[in-house]
């Protein structure tokens, strides 16, 4: 059975006790997902490096930093200082190859994110350079949105590319992941599941993470 990793998004956590919220899932999660939004690329403003650094100071979990911002070049260096994964959006930079290489030179995993409308085929000339592809399964900007079923085809295409080329990039999926949607996402080929509301809005965040990791039910391989 393929190992599924879970990256809980603190966007859905209680910000008045963020350290406590992160500690709840520390023993079962694989990452802490940091949704950085600038109010320009997406219609919401969340937090930046200072808050992310504070999260880093209270947990041993690696940070999975998702930069939903215009001009990501201005932020990648400082986020590389505290993160294991830094994700930039295909839609936000004219020089994606240069930016991916800049992240990798910091010995940080470089992921590229695709909005629901962005085609996998646009990654043809960069796919061999990335450590992962983050598929947005909702339109980025807000938590708690409903999963867009058509992105399953995008996940399958990425999984087919991996099989055909022998590349080892991870497929991460972000948006609307919960008990009803996660199995189809995993079966399509996802390796890392991002969930916020489902985990931090649960009465039992630990059990919610375990469900997504397949530790509470059987998941067939995709």
Image (cartoon, rainbow, N blue to C red):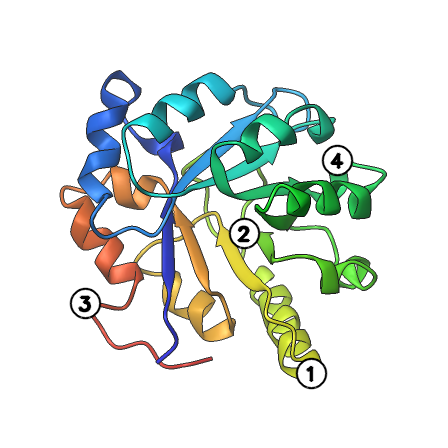
Tell which circle, 2 or 4, labels the residue nearer the N-terminal end.
4
Q: Which mark is residue 216?
A: 3
Look at discs 2 and 3 and give the one toward the viewer: 3
The span from disc 2 to disc 3 (Cα, nearest Å) is 23 Å
Q: Residue at x 56, y 66 (%)?
A: 152
Residue identified by numbered label 1: 164
**Residue 46 in view of the camera:** no
Tell which circle, 4 or 3, labels the residue nearer the N-terminal end.
4
Q: Which mark is residue 92?
A: 4
Tell which circle, 1 or 4, labels the residue nearer the N-terminal end.
4
In the rendered image, residue 179, in percent from the top left (x then y), is placed at 30, 58
**Residue 187 in view of the camera:** yes
In the displayed structure, would residue 93 be above or below residue 6?
above
Tell me the element at label 2: loop
Q: Which mark is residue 37?
A: none
Label 3 Cα neighbours within 10 Å, binned few <14 / some 14-19 / many ≥20:
few
The span from disc 2 to disc 4 (Cα, nearest Å) is 18 Å
In the displayed structure, would residue 118 be above or below residue 149?
above
Q: Quadrant of residue 70?
A: top right
**The N terminus is located in which quarter?**
bottom left
């Amino acid at each position: 059975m393929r190992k599924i990793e879970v990256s809980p998004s603190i966007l859905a956590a209680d910000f008045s006790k963020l350290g406590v919220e992160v500690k709840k899932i520390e023993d079962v999660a694989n990452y802490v997902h940091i949704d950085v939004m600038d109010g320009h690329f997406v219609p919401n403003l969340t937090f930046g490096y200072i808050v992310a650094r504070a999260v880093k100071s209270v947990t041993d979990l690696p940070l999975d930093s998702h930069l939903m911002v215009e001009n990501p070049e201005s932020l990648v260096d400082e986020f590389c200082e505290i993160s294991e994964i830094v994700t930039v959006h295909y839609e936000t930079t004219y020089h994606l190859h240069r930016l991916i290489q800049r992240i990798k030179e910091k010995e940080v995993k470089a992921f590229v994110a695709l909005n629901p409308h962005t085609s996998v085929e646009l990654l043809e000339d960069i796919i061999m350079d990335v450590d992962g592809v983050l598929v947005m399964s909702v339109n980025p900007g807000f938590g708690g949105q409903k999963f867009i079923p058509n992105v399953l085809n995008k996940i399958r295409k990425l999984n087919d590319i991996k099989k055909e080329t022998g590349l080892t990039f991870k497929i991460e999926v972000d948006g609307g992941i919960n008990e009803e949607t996660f199995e189809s996402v995993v079966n399509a080929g996802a390796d890392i599941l991002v969930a916020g509301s489902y985990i931090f809005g649960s009465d039992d965040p630990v059990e919610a993470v375990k469900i997504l990791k397949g530790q509470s039910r059987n998941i067939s391989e995709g």
